[in-house]
Amino acid sequence: MSLTPLTFTGVSKYSTDFQTILSRAVSIANIPAKAIQNQQTDLVQKKLITTNLQTAATGLASSLTALTAVGDNKGLTASSSASSKVAILTSTGTTAAAYTVSEITSVAKAASETSAIGYADASTVAVSSTGTVKFTAGSNNYTINLTPATNNLTGLRDAINNLGVGVTASVLTTGTGLTPNYLSVSANATGAQALSLTDDPGGAATALLTSNNQGANAVFKLNGVAVSKSSNTINDVVPGISFSILGTTSGETVSLTLATDRTKLTSALQTFVANYNALSSQLDGQIGPAAGVLSGDFLIREVHGDLRSLTGFQGTGTIKSFSDVGLELSNTGELSLNTATLDGLSASAIDSAFTFVGSSVTGLGSLNSKFTQLSDPINGLIKIQQNQYDVTNTRLADDLANITDKVSLMQTVMAQKLQAADLLLAQLDSQQSVLTGVLLGVTNSLYGTSAK
């Protein structure tokens, strides 16, 4: 809220002086308001700085979580020697392993059949000679009773769909020939499944559907053991690996391996370094001679302590410190990754490195909670402080409004008084001019000349 200054309009020769008096009085009375506005400006700056801190702390917490994931599964990555036949979907294993997939004789597909004959019209031509049809889906049988109004392709389609048994019926219109309409029935999921439609099941038992595609299971051998699954997505056979059967094989063997991938650790550490430096940079702006408005603030001390806990972390295995995995801290506090040190680790040392960075209990990743406690958007320390800024800003806004109202009233009242004084002085000036004229006239009458 700002104060609208009044412009003094007087008629006396002192009106300019009165304007100066009014402006100065208002300026002095408005000093507390200026102080509040300065505090509000600082609060806006603090809110921006803490928002940037929150973003940087969130990034660092995320990178620590990623390190934990890499460390917990030792950087294991699943791969397939023939991804066009067997594709890896997910990998959650924690132990290196190797498997062979062979003799893929069948890929899972959904059953799908059409009516054995076509019909001239989908809504008038009868499909059943008796009105009673048996529908079979897998090992389940269902009796469908068609009325004269529904004894047609459309009615039969709707009756099958209304069963809700995992199949979809539709009417196909080819647009050619005398009988262009056909019934199509397809299973909603892959796997070997009998689909049949029998008219007059207790009598003639006429098959209304073809039996050309009764679906198929994915059939293969894993390490020589026969496996048959209704889906091509296989997630319950190999521990820690989910894969998909894409094609059949003809004598070849597909190898599935779960092995450590060092590049996962390198990538995770590089992300960690970038996020560490981002938060450290935000912190640097509030420390030292050129520190910002949060200099000495509790949050700054808290973040500084948390970063020190990271760089000073000590492991329990062969890899004990940042420098052991190539993490190097410069004199200016910037973190970097020496990939030559990391790449030079032996197989046993790299295993210890995964433990150092990733154990959610004892590793570097266990410090993640320090930064989530800072950055949590609801209950984090930064959010709590930002909420307090908002409370303070609301109070200051109220105080500013009160001061502005008081100064405005003072300005109005003072202006009125000065206006009255200005008018009185103008009147006195006018009276003085009249008296001077009278005296000059008397002098001229008595002496014939003006008094000197």
Image (cartoon, rainbow, N blue to C red):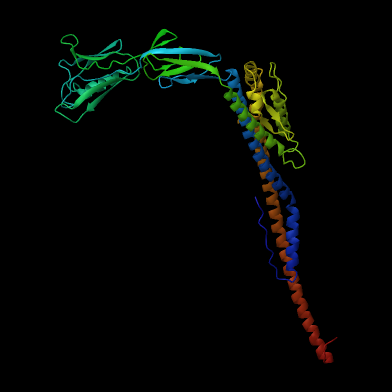
Quadrant of the image occupied by residue 53 = top right
**Residue 348: image x %, image y %?**
64, 15
In this picture, is 420 found above or below 44? below
Furthest residue to the bottom? 448
The quadrant in which the C terminus is found is bottom right
Q: Which residue is at a point 61% across and 27% down the rendered structure image? A: 63
Q: Can residue 213 be spotted in the picture?
A: yes
Q: Which residue is at a point 73% across and 67% down the rendered structure image? A: 16
Name the residue nearer the viewer: 257 or 125.
Answer: 257
In this picture, is 439 found above or below 357? below
Quadrant of the image occupied by residue 415 = bottom right
Horizontal side of 96 relative to 337 (left or right) equals: left
**Residue 172: image x %, image y %?**
23, 26
Furthest residue to the right? 452
Q: Which residue is at a point 46% across and 21% down the rendered structure image? A: 89
Q: Can residue 395 be spotted in the picture?
A: no
In this picture, is 1 found above or below 133? below
Horizontal side of 345 relative to 131 (left or right) equals: right
